[in-house]
Structures are given as C-alpha cells and as structure tokens.
Amino acid sequence: MSSETTHAAHHEGEEHESMTKKKIWSVFWILLGITTIEFIIALYLVPHGIIPLKAANPVYIILTLFKAFYIIAYFMHLKFERVGLIYAVVVPVLFIIGLILVLTNESHHWIDLRA
Amino acid sequence: MSTAVSPIDEVKTTPWSGGRSPFSVEYGKIMMWFFLLSDAFTFSSLLIAYGALRFSSVSWPAADLIFQSVPGTSIEHGAPLVFVGIMTFILIMSSVTMVLGVEAGHRGAKKEVAIWLVLTVVGGFMFLGCQALEWRHLFSEGFGWGHIPKDLGEFFHKDATPSAAYTQQFANLFFTITGFHGFHVFTGVIINIIILVNVLVGTYEKRGSYLMVEKVGLYWHFVDLVWVFVFTFFYLV
C-alpha cells in the first residue's frame, strides 16, 4: 500500500509535462504573428480606410485576449496544472469582468453629466 | 472471512478527498499565483479607470499622433507604433528566454539556465532603457504628471476638439500605468539577477530542483502579460 502511494505521488510529479523547446518557439511565433496582425491593422488597414476604427478596436481586444491566453496557458504553464488550480486562478477574473461592465456603464452616465 | 471492502470503507483517491493538496503544486508556487492574481486586480483597476475616463470624454488625444517618433533617433514624425513595437518585441523575446531557462531547469542543466537568465536580464534592461527614452522624449514635449504642452492641436485628429482637461487625464494615466508597469519590470529584473546569482552559486543544484526559477518565471511572464494589455489600450485602441 505504501509503495503504491509513493508511486502515485511520483507519478503525479511526472505528470507535469514540461514545455518542449519546439513548443516554446511555436508559441513565440504565434505571439509575434498576432502582434504583426495588429500592426497591419493599425498601420495599413485603418489609415487606408479599409477598416473603420470603430471596427478595429474590438478586433484589437480579441487579439489581445488571444495573446493573453497563450502567455498564461503555455508560458505560465497553467494549461498543464490541476483543474483546481486553473479554476482558482481563472474564476476570480469574473470580478474584473464585473468591474469592466459596471464602470463602462457608469462612464456613459458621466458623459451625460458633463454635456 | 471475506476480504471484500464495502464501498463505504474504500479509500478515496480523488484530488479533493484529503491527505494531499488538490492543486498538487508546491506552496511557494501557488502563493505566487495568488500574488499575481491580486496584482492582476490592481492593474485591471488602473486600466479600467483609464477606460472609464476615456469613454466619458468628449474628445481624446490620438495615440498615433502622440507616439509617432522613435526616441533616440532623428525620426520625429510619421512613425507611429514603431518604437513601441520594438519594446513589445523585446519583452516577448525576454519572456521566451525565461521559459527556455525554466525548460533547462527541468533538465537540471545549470549552465543553460544561467545563459537564458542572463539573456532575460539583458532583455529587461533593454525594455527599461526604451521606456526611459520614451518618457524623456514625452517630457521634452511637455508631457508629465500635471504637465501638458501648450499647443495641443497636433495631438488631436482633425474631427476632434483639442481639450486640455482630457489631455491632462491622458498624461496622468499614461505615466501612472506605464510607470507602475515599469516598476514591475524593474523589480522583475532585480529578482532575476538574484536568482541568476543563486544559479551560479549552485543553490538550486544543491536543492535538487530549479523550482525557484519557475516561480520567478511566473512573475516575469505576468509582467509581459500586463504589457500586452497596456500596449493595446494605450497605443492601439
């Protein structure tokens, strides 16, 4: 029994599949690629009127969230951690989303007060 | 006698049935995660305050008109995003060298860890140097905490009315948020140097694990993560 538990504990430690060098560089190229797309939008597509600025902003934010996912999941290794740790870190982000909703809503009232 | 165990007496081995941490992560590492979560709240509050003030403004200075020079060179106009693009590249690159150092640590390759950490520290200093150049350039234009240039026309798009009050809000938020981020980069560099010295002295070799490099790596990646958001909300949107 005791040898079984030590084996299980050992196995648990091994389970942490580490990032291979290949994987690290592929994440780097993804991050660089996303940043390049943002630059193309900002330096070419918007100034030439191909995309209006109002449409570009949500695209920037979505691309930023993609970058954030790759940094947290792969560089910070969260994707390979236990489910409990993933939820402990990701669920509190709901508070941030809540603050975004409250304050953007509030700011629309401020603009009425200023006018 | 039967040796069959009734279901109620069976020892449960699920992660949450006790006897071991359900997270199966070393104490210091999980504390680093919780610290980063609290730090994420701080940065979010700052960035959301920036968003709220910007949404409630009638006109806002245009990023591509304020940040269109490359400090340290003779390019003064018409190159928006170039300098901050270099800064972003440096920081992403130093994040990659950090994660490569962590990977070398898993294999216990002391020399490789040291090399990657040196490169990470160099990247951190390069980023700080770029930020110093950028700030100095903005100061020379008249921007600062509580200071804005007299003539604001060149910082607003043609369809927007230049406003001193909103430009001042922009300047204060910009210096506060990038300053707070720069302070994080600075502490990150200092901690990286301490870790590097420990690697060279052989502290982690004796300990048998390079987990400390991993924990500091988490902090360093977080700094990169924050920059991704600062970059989007100050320079792109």
Image (cartoon, rainbow, N blue to C red):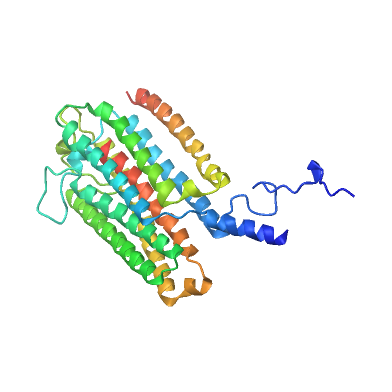
Which is more toward the observer, B30 or A10? A10
Q: In which quadrant will I find the C terminus of chain B?
A: top left
Where is residue A97? Give x, y as percent: 46, 34
How many numbered dots are placed on residues in this image? 0
Which is more toward the observer, B123 or B16? B16
Residue at position x 41%, y 49% from top? A74
Residue at position x 25%, y 57% from top? B132
The picture quadrant where one finds residue B196 is bottom left
Please give left or right for residue B197 compared with residue B235 in the image: right
Where is residue B15? Give x, y as percent: 64, 47
- Residue B172 seen in this snapshot: no
Please determine whether, in this image, residue A111 is positioned above or below residue B68. Answer: above
The picture quadrant where one finds residue B118 is bottom left
Residue at position x 42%, y 54% from top? A19
Q: Residue furthest front?
A: B1
Please determine whether, in this image, residue B45 is positioned above or below residue B107. Answer: above
Please give left or right for residue A90 compared with residue B58 in the image: right
Q: Residue furthest bottom?
A: B201
- Residue B2 seen in this snapshot: yes
Which is more toward the observer, B111 or B8? B8
Where is residue B161? Give x, y as percent: 20, 29
Q: Residue furthest right?
A: B1
Where is residue B105? Give x, y as percent: 43, 64
Please determine whether, in this image, residue B213 is positioned above or below residue A96. Answer: below
